[in-house]
Image (cartoon, rainbow, N blue to C red):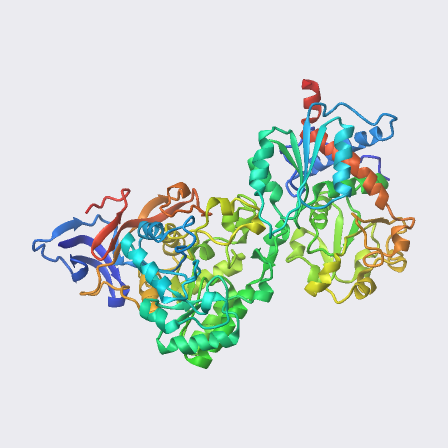
Amino acid sequence: MKRLLKGGRVVDPANGIDGARDVLIDGDRIARIGVDLPVDGATVVEIPDGLVICPGLIDMHVHLREPGQEHKETIASGTASAVAGGFTAVACMPNTNPVNDDANVTAYILAKAREANLARVYPIGAVSRSSKGELLADIGDLRKAGCVAITDDGHPVATAILLRRALEYAGMFDMPVIEHCEDPSLKGDGVAHEGYYAATLGLRGMPGACEALGVERGVLLSELTGSAFHVAHMSARASLRAVRKGKEAGFRVTCEVAPHHFTLTDEALATPLAYDTNTKMNPPLREAEDRDAMLAGIADGTVDAIATDHAPHHYDEKKVEFDRAPFGIVGLETAVSLSFDRLVHAGRVRLSRLVELMSLNPARILKVDGGTLSEGAPADITILAPDLKVRVEAAKLRSRSKNTPFDGWELRGGVAATIVGGRPLFVNPDTRISF
Amino acid sequence: MTTVHDVEQKPAVTSLRSKDLLGIAEMLPEEITLVLDTADAMKEIATRPIKKVPALRGKTVVNLFFEPSTRTRTSFEIAEKRLSADTLNIAIATSSVVKGETLADTAMNLEAMRPDMIVIRHSSSGACHLLSRICRSAIINAGDGMHEHPTQALLDAFTIREHKKRLKGLKVAIVGDLLHSRVLRSNIHLLTKMGADVWVCGPPTLMPTEIRRFGVTPTSHVEDAVAGADVIMMLRIQLERMEGAYFPSLREYFSVFGMTEARVKLANPDVMIMHPGPMNRGVEIASEVADGPYSVILEQVANGVAVRMAVLYLLAGGADYEEAA
């Protein structure tokens, strides 16, 4: 069937488009983009004033927890959360149980994703078997089964030599190595950013240098190997400095920042609720200078992508002493609103830059379809509502887990609709759009 | 010349604002003064032949200790008994390896039996905050991880006030493992709120981040910290800290930071030497100092009972409660 999205503002930085256009969808593909396209038998979807049509958003860093931890999230609930958050595709981390270090696990994930039939799922395989940091996983098999990158996320790749080999080997398949950057000895048993708030609350700290050491290692090894190195969930200003230097030198280094790291600081550990375990993640919420550096890096182009590090945990697991709680928060359904509110409406980036950060660049880094509204491309489209007033309600999240520090927050900007392969899978009833 | 209770110590309040005592950080100076003044009255009870008053009769107090403790647990228990509370001691060995009932479940089960107060000691910072959100009972923090140990700071202040008749303007030097100490954090909050000049001293490896923001003067030169001090508070050095490479050896620690008679001589002639216990003689403090004329270490222990009685009494409703009863 044909659908004509009529009357919206199209923002498609890959094609240099930012203006009034109609979008014709034919089946699962984008057929045409143009001014005042003829209806020609298509079903017309009127796009209300103020809404923005952009290429489907891609979250390149989520934890879908399946197989093995289905009490936290499943591929079905996670991809439902994704489309509700405006994401047409997600890349899922391999720290499942069993670890996605084997083509059978990859195939299982993809089968579950087909069954759910919501957002597209791009599995990310492990660097090492069981992510133990000893032997390389069968990276070629993982690639063939559908993995788009490799990582030992949750932990850094154990040794410099193994990271070097992974970069060299994955480079053969043109896959990036995504690294959870961290020096384990400097992290120790840290549970929060090493700063004033951890000191006053008596929480064991981990400094920004702990992350930056891992970034520096990766940048050096990217130079040595010539392979693509991607810094996951960057949070520290020293890390940004290392990435910037690497990019200036022409190395193949990219990085992502999570919305909580450009929104919150370690002050959230103490207030409004002291020891709220929904402020515990790794890397931790850092001090204001780090948060401001992330904002600056997003604005000046050093940061390539916004990724949520969506990390669902059951409330039982979070309702414990702070130092015993697992790291991580859910992020898929708050990312767009936080990005609008803190980046676009705050005047830090233009909307087209936001689309680069959340769609085009993740597609380019992972070398997957999407990221553009080119004619003939899959009809993965997100319709944004830049001025929608959004109130975050944890209890209403589609994710199976509700661990968010943003419960009750009021933000400006949200999602109107999410279209995957031509199918409108999420339509926000708070916007005047109907399919 | 100061009077027994000078201006800063006049209570402007007659009750505590919170149902709980989680930390000194949340207390107003007036509330601190109220606790200390109430402890003055409580201390007299220990001098009577029959050391018991009916203030907490019919109240149930649970002492929930997840960490071994002799001094603090005993002190609380004596305080509770002198106030005629019904007390119950629960000691739970915790291990991160053995997965037992969660703290939240323990709290909900206890709460179901409707105790009036829960005194909790736990190795995790903020454990008492978790309990406070679950329980209607008054929660008293008897030490949570590296966060706070508010009754220790109150008894320290009480002891200082007995000797010096004031807290304001005193130079207090706190020396030892600053990073891991909940006693330090509570004392810093209390002493800075009450206008003391607080110096903290230890190796840089054991100095909390941004310690200056706490309103204290940090130094790693013990002579500077104790020079002209009115009070020297020693903090315990945990013997396992060497393994974390915080300092090379106990011998070297003692030579750089140990409180010796020679160092005490740099302080004011009427300096008080304090230690929250348990002491490592010959590591952070020389025995001659611990047992010497300036030491008030055993007075601290005695005052602990009076201060904890005051806290229990005030959280139970204080005078309001007694009138109603």
Please name the residue shown 34% across and 59% down the image. Answer: A109
**Residue at left 72%, top 60%?**
B241
Q: Nearer the viewer, residue B275 or B224?
A: B275
Left or right of A367, for residue A239: right
Residue at the spot 77% in from the left edge and 40% down from the top edge: B155
**Location of residue B226 by image quarter:** bottom right
Instruction: Determine the residue located farthest toward the front in the rendered image.
Output: A104
Residue B178 spot, x, y in % from top left: 71, 55
Q: Residue A386, image x and y in percent?
A: 31, 51
**Left or right: A375 as drawn, with respect to A56:** left
x, y percentage for residue A83? 30, 52
Quadrant (top left/top right/bottom left/bottom right) for the N terminus of chain A: bottom left
Number of marks in the rendered image: 0
Give left or right: position of B227 versus A43: right
Q: In this view, does B74 lie above or below B84?
A: below
Farthest-out residue, left = A40
Query: Between residues A149 and A350, which one lies in front from this camera angle?
Result: A149
Can residue B36 be seen? no
Residue A214 drawn above or below residue A429:
below
Residue at the image position 28 percent from the left and 54 percent from the top: A115
* Residue B7, picture quadrant: top right
Residue B42 % position (x, y): 79, 30
Up-down relation of residue A69 to residue A256 (above or below): above
Regarding residue A249, the answer to whether it shows in the image is yes
